Amino acid sequence: MSGCTNRSRHSAQENTRKHLSKDTRVEGWNHTFPAAPAGAIPSTVFKEDHTLQVNGATLILKHYMPAHTDSDISVHFTEADIFHTGDTFWNRNYPFIDYSTGGSIEGTIRAAEANLARVTDKMIVIPGHGAVGGKADLILFRTCWLKSATR
Amino acid sequence: MVTTASAELSRRQFLAATGLTAATAWLTPTALFAQSDDVLVPHALKEAATAKVTVQTLRRNISVFTVQAKHRCPYWPDGKLLVDAEIVSARPNVFAALTSINADPSSN
């Protein structure tokens, strides 16, 4: 998470800071991402859960078990009832799993289950990729992965 | 007069064809066949630099920015907050979109 000013604060799961602090090789893309500049390194990190109060809104940040990477988090805007899954959910897109940073198929399925356990019918769900959706889209994503994993 | 093409290949045609094939193989950059080329990410970054940012308003001052099917989720009014702001080369266009959603100053 980040703002766009020089005075912005960056919050992230602790593994994100670890990855951004050094060159990271992503074999699936055949690319080495250079270490981020000092100003882009998250200043606030957390391990499992973190709550932010921003302009009267409550944001609950929650770490997944390793899924797409080992530093995936969800963000729940509680008053607006909007749930951001990050790249643990690709709505009607084939997902990329970053094995270089701890991602796995099993973890992706586990994250899909975790998302379904938290999402309600009224919740707006923002995926990492694809159109904004809802619970039905998450169910479809989970079902597709379960079928793939059992083949 | 009707001319019919012979199905047989003359010696001259054979030499020309094989010579051309050999020259093409010799001159083709080996990089085209290399599996180790790093092209995907640089291409994506280049595309993102000029990609259009679309803004979709959801609830309670929360909008979704989409750049090349990648979502960013800003929140305002007093401050501006981005969740999952990933593609660094799209920064100028994202910055412009942030400025467009309200008049609060942003600096880059």
Image (cartoon, rainbow, N blue to C red):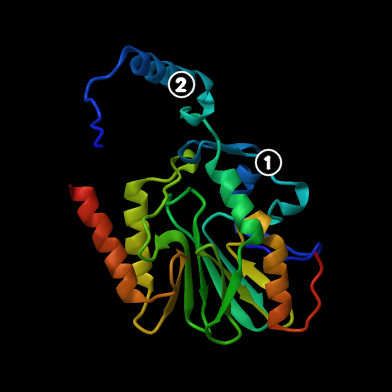
From the viewer's side, name the closer residue of B46 and A112.
Answer: B46
Q: Nearer the viewer, mark 1 or mark 2?
A: 2
Q: Is residue B18 above or below residue B68?
A: above
Report the number of numbered marks: 2
Q: x, y percentage for residue A100?
A: 48, 39
Q: Is residue A142 above or below residue A121?
A: above
Q: Amino acid at mark 1?
A: Ala
Q: What residue is shown at x 51% (from left), y 58% (from top)?
A: A48
* Secondary structure of the residue carrying numbered label 2: helix
Q: What residue is shown at x 71% (from left), y 56% (from top)?
A: A43
The reply to whether discs 1 and 2 touch (Cβ–Cβ < 8 Å) is no
Name the residue tied to disc 1. A35
Quarter assignment of residue A61: bottom right
Q: Is residue A21 visible?
A: yes
Instruction: Provide the chain ID for the residue under circle 1.
Output: A
Name the residue tied to disc 2. B25
Q: What residue is shown at x 70% (from left), y 51% (from top)?
A: A41
